Every structure is written in C-alpha cells, then in structure tokens.
Image (cartoon, grey):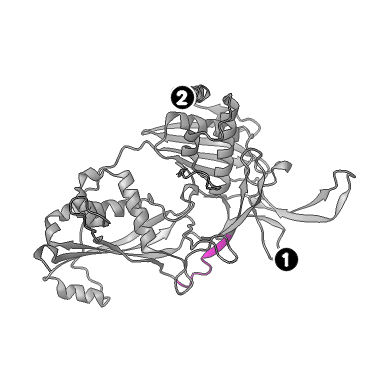
Amino acid sequence: MSDNSKLVSTIIIKGVLENTSPFVIGTGKGDIIDIEIIKDENGNPYIPATSFVGALRHHILKNFKEKDIKEELWEYFWGSKKNNQKNLEIQSHFIVSDVKIKDNNSGSHIVIRDGVAIEQKTGIAKNKAKYDYEIVNKGLKFEFKAEIKIRQNFKDKETEILKILKTILTELGAEKVQFGAFTTKGFGRFNLKNVQILKFDFPKDGVNYLKLLQHEYLTEDKLDLSKINILTKKVNYDCTIIANFSIKSSLIISSYTTDPDEPDKVHIKYNGKEVLTGTSLKGAIRSRAFKIINTLCRNNQEKNDDLNKLFGWADTENKEKSKYKSRVIIDESIVDGVIEKEQARIKIDRFTGGVMEGALFQSKPLWHNDETVQLKIKIKDAKDWEIGLLLLVLKDLWNEDLPIGGEKNIGRGVLKGKKIEIEYKEYKYIIKKSTNDDATNKISVKDSDKQILEGFVEELLEKVRDWDVR
C-alpha cells in the first residue's frame, strides 16, 4: 500500500432518522400486493444503503454547486465508476449502513392502501386499473450510521470533506431529502436528529477507535461542525402554497375493510387518524389543470410537453422512452376536528325507480364540524405561468367547483376556502376570506399582491397563445 492511500482518519456519524410522512421502498410486485415493502430478516421495513445514498447524492448534486469542490474530491467522497483523467473506478469513502428500525415492539409498521388509475379525459376509473400497495406508517425511528474514511492523499482536503458532510446533515435535519417512491405525493420525508460525530486520527486514536467498535460510548472525540460552512446552494425558485379549506358537507377517500363489523367504505386513515392523501389531491389537481388548459386552447393539449414536465409523465404502453418526474409535490395532511358518522345507502333501479334487491351498503365519511383541511403544494423551480395555472385550480377549489375524493355524485368532497399563502422568491402573498360568514366566498387580497397574482395568470395566458400557434 502506498503512503497516499494510507488511512489517516475516520469520522463516525450516528443519529436517529424519523419518517415524518409515510414511505414506500418496495421489492416490486408481490404475490398478493402490487407493491410490497422491502423488509429485513425480522420482518421490519428498512432502507437499503444503496437507495439511501443514491437519493442523497442526487439531492446534493441537484441543489448545490459542485464547482465549490473539485471533481476529484466529489469522486473520492461519493465514488465513481470511471475517472475522466485516469480511467479508474473509485470507491466511495462515504460509507452508510442499511437504515434499520430502532424499536421492534412499536406495533404494526405497515398498512395496505388501495389505489385506482383515473381516466384523465372522463374522470372515471380505468378498466382493470385498481391496485394496492404497502406503505410504512410515519413516526417510526431508524438508526442512521455512516463513516467517512480520510486517506493521506486527501488529508489537506478535510475542510472540504466536512463541508459536504455538514451539507448532508443540514438537509436531512431540514427534511429536504425524500426517499423511496411517491415522493411527489408527499411520501418519503425524514428528519435527522440526535446526531453524534466522532473523529479518530490514526495511529493516535487507535485504541479509542477499537473501544468504539466494542460499543463503548466516547465523549472526548466529538467533532464540532459549527464553524464549517455548507456548500453554496443553486438558485432554484421554488413556489410553496399552503391552502386552508373547510369541508362544505362531507368527504370520503375510500378505504375498504375485511372486518364484517365495519361499514363497506370508510375514510382512509393511518395511525388511527383521518388523512387527506397526496395521491387523491394530486390526481384531482392535475386533471383540473389539463381541463383548464384544454378550455383555453383551441387544440387539445393532452400531450403538451410543458404540462407533462410540470406534472410528470411516463409512457405506460412503452411506445416512447421519454419520461418526466413531476415538479409538483403535494403533501399528505391530517384532517382534525371532523365528525366521522356512518350513513346507510341503497341503489335505485333507474328503469323502475325501485330499490335494487340486496343493494344496501354503508359508508362512513367525514362530516363538517370544526376542521381545517390543509393542502401543501410545492412547485420545484417554478415558472410564473405554472403558478398562474395552480392559482386557477385553487380558484375552482375555493369556489366549490372541484370536489376531492369519492362519491362526488352525491355532493361529497366539496371544499370551502379559508386562507391561501403563496411564497415565491422571498415574497409572501396572502388570500383570505373577507368575512367570517360561511355563506360567502368573497376574498381579501392586498392591491399590490392582487396585481402580482394577476400577472402570474397573464403569463399563463401568454403561454397558451404560444401553444395555440404551434
């Protein structure tokens, strides 16, 4: 072994990762479930180190300026299949263990959800497009273990290595990195806390390092990163929209149960709490956005590339190779303050007007009480016309014209606007009800904000004119 490759230091990082939203890291299609969660030898969900580091590396490279660090150091830290200069493969010196659950006795970690693909043009379910998938409940704690090896030839680059580490820990602590599937629907958010960082210089700290391997807790080798800066962020103008609504009458996002004592349909829950799912919200918002554009345009825009890049698109029939990940992220939210009450219903024969035999069923929707239904929407690297389009969708939600969830044909899922906050380019715009009277939907907006918000819609109309002449 040459002197340059000699190991001179090891940095150990430990912490606790808590998933603040459900997550899905699957093994593919199972025998019974369409998407099964990957599990360890004890049957507990975990995150493979390959998935974890892959998502982390992609996030850092996409959101921070790698030019702050020389390419050689990036490859040393993350690893590289081929070095441009020497044509050599480089092993990563940032080593992460599989992220495994800390508490094996916390009850059921995994639940099954139902889903159905919706035909965008008609708004009804596609034939044979029902699917189910496992998700991992939020609020679980996982062990985060990582280490960084520093060799002789990079000893003078230790400060730059610590900058990368500080950036990683900062982003994980701020819940900025998402892991697994359905990340654009609010899944896969984690929060890193209780971080401990230990540094061992060799050969001086060799004995202490061996003690650590024997699971002895050490305090004298703690590494302080408080004076280390993070990498420079790229300029990404994300737009964040937080919209608060109430339920006009009732709401149900259906979940089916095998319990004979339960109604045929109940509102979907996790951890015993009613939830407004990102999948339902995003499906409704995407469908209405395309409907608005097709109303404004003279020609059909179902294959509009700009819209597909905004909302995401993949060719399910494998006729084309192109695919886009959605830049619109919609989080799940808990619905508190509602009343859950069972309602019996019957099917009517449309020809005779009489009751169909054996067609009695029960549903258990959420009923209006004192609730706040919150929608949190983010447009990554937003353009003005995209904000204008989302504003028109929110206008329909506010004006009770865009129902969410199931049983829309009997008036469920209609929302009433309370307040909308829009943050974009360090500015905040607020739309709120001008009165406490539930019978009116009149809004209050500052004149200066109104001009800017109308400007976003004007940008959308200009974009529509461009699409019409193509």
| Label ID, residue 459 | 2
Instruction: Name the residue located 81 percent from the left edge and 55 percent from the top edge.
Output: 360
Query: In the figure, 386 relative to 271: above or below?
Result: above
Q: Does residue 431 sit above or below 410 in this rendering? A: above
- Camera-side mark, 1 or 2: 2
Q: Is residue 111 magenta?
A: yes
| Residue type at tag 1 | Pro
From this viewpoint, which residue is outermost toward the left? 3
Instruction: Of the two numbered discs 1 and 2 on the same chain, state the one appearing first in sequence.
Output: 1
| 222 or 469: nearer the viewer | 469
> Can you identify the residue that label 1 sits on?
260
Question: Looking at the magenta stretch, what is its main secondary structure?
Answer: loop
- Distance of label 1 from label 2 (alpha carbons): 54 Å
Question: Residue 53: horizontal and vertical position, in percent?
Answer: 34, 58
Q: Are marks 1 and 2 in contact (CB under 8 Å)?
A: no
Quadrant where the N terminus lies?
Answer: bottom left
Can see residue 188? yes
Bounds of the magenta segment = 104-112
Q: Where in the figure is residue 36, as x and y percent of width and height?
A: 53, 63
Q: Nearer the viewer, residue 469 or 5?
A: 469
